[in-house]
Amino acid sequence: MFSQAFTVRADSIARHLETVFLFTENDVRTTLIPVTIFALSVAPKYDPSHVWHAPLWIWFHLLQFNLANQIQDPEEDRKNKPSRPIPAGRISVDSAADIRWVMVPVCLLLSLWYGTQALLASTVFAAFTIWYNELHGDKLGLSKNVLTAILGGCLEFGGTVAVGSGNSGIDKAGVLAIALSSTVFATTLHAQDFKDEEGDRLTGRCTLPTLFPKAARFSMMLGIPIWSFGLSRMWELDALSTTAYVIYGAFVGTRFMMYNTVDADKQSCKFYSLWYALGHLLPGYWRFFYGV
């Protein structure tokens, strides 16, 4: 009997843990991995045994954001994203809301362990999470891009601090890297909105692809290769690496302009995610060859 009860209890715990993970599952490829790579590239110094601190800090804050986001309109998720925990019936909206607000002090306490810089990043992240979700800052395309870029910058800042050895903090090169990354994200983030354009029109959500469909696609074709060249020069890449990165950026940008079906946009978004992730490696290139 004890063995059976223990098995049932273990299964229940495993199911709850899986439910929590599912809130952030879609962000593992698009956010958790790229931002972790960025933190390892930007940190002035770190002990290899501390590497896990970056994804830990980032994931806890992603969970806070996704809980806040996914309790806003569960009916829409039932139509468009039925596999998410709430529409799938794994957890109620009220229970998710309770965990959402518990995650704020949990993230702050976790950040306090890493020092005042991480605590500041967590505080700003919590405030802008409220602005984005509870105050509906995501309803306008430009506002959504700017808010998401700020939130992404907080993740990069906090993850970089968390992985640093002995609370070493972030130097000027790190601050520049975060500022550039946030700006790139703010001006190219709508690459992720093209695949949802039809659904966004039906629900009345304003994104750059729904407001300015042709201009938004043109901005991808023009902006991504320009950013590729600018970042390559900023981080002093060699000629061969610069050429390769610019060519790949041109390929990604041109895809958005030439192919506009839902399936094509999903594929283009994957290529964009890789382009953005590669950009996260560039500060590490500079640190390796030119940093002190």
Image (cartoon, rainbow, N blue to C red):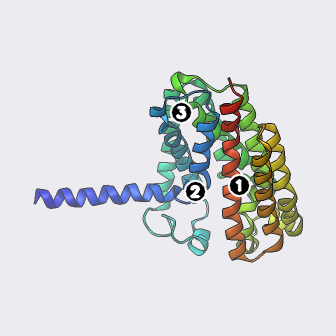
Mark 3 is on which residue type?
Answer: Val
Q: Are marks 2 and 1 in contact (CB under 8 Å)?
A: no
Residue appearing at x 61%, y 73% in the figure = 80
Residue 46 percent location from the top left of the image: 54, 29
Q: Earlier in the sequence, mark 1 or mark 3?
A: 3
Residue at the disc numbered 3: 163
List the single residue furthest toward the front. Answer: 240
Mark 2 is surrounded, within 10 Å at the Cα level, by few (under 14), some (14 to 19) or many (20 or more) other residues, namely: some
- Type of amino acid under label 1: Trp
Disc nearest the viewer among 2 and 1: 1
Image quarter (top left, top right, bottom left or bottom right) of the N terminus: bottom left
Residue 33 in the figure: left or right of residue 187: left
Q: Which residue in the structure is indicated by mark 1? A: 275
Q: Which residue in the protein does label 2 denote? A: 29
Q: Quick one: label 1, few (<14), some, or many (20+) residues within 10 Å?
A: some
Left or right of residue 161, residue 208 in this image: right
- The percent position of residue 199, horizontal first and vertical second, equals 70, 73
Residue flagged by tag 2: what amino acid is it? Arg
Quarter occupied by the C terminus: top right
Q: Nearer the viewer, residue 31 or 101?
A: 31
Q: Residues within 10 Å of mark 3 (few under 14, many from 20)?
A: many
Q: Relative to 82, is 166 above or below?
A: above
Regarding residue 146, the answer to whether it shows in the image is no
Task: Tell me the residue at 78%/37% (across/down).
Answer: 236
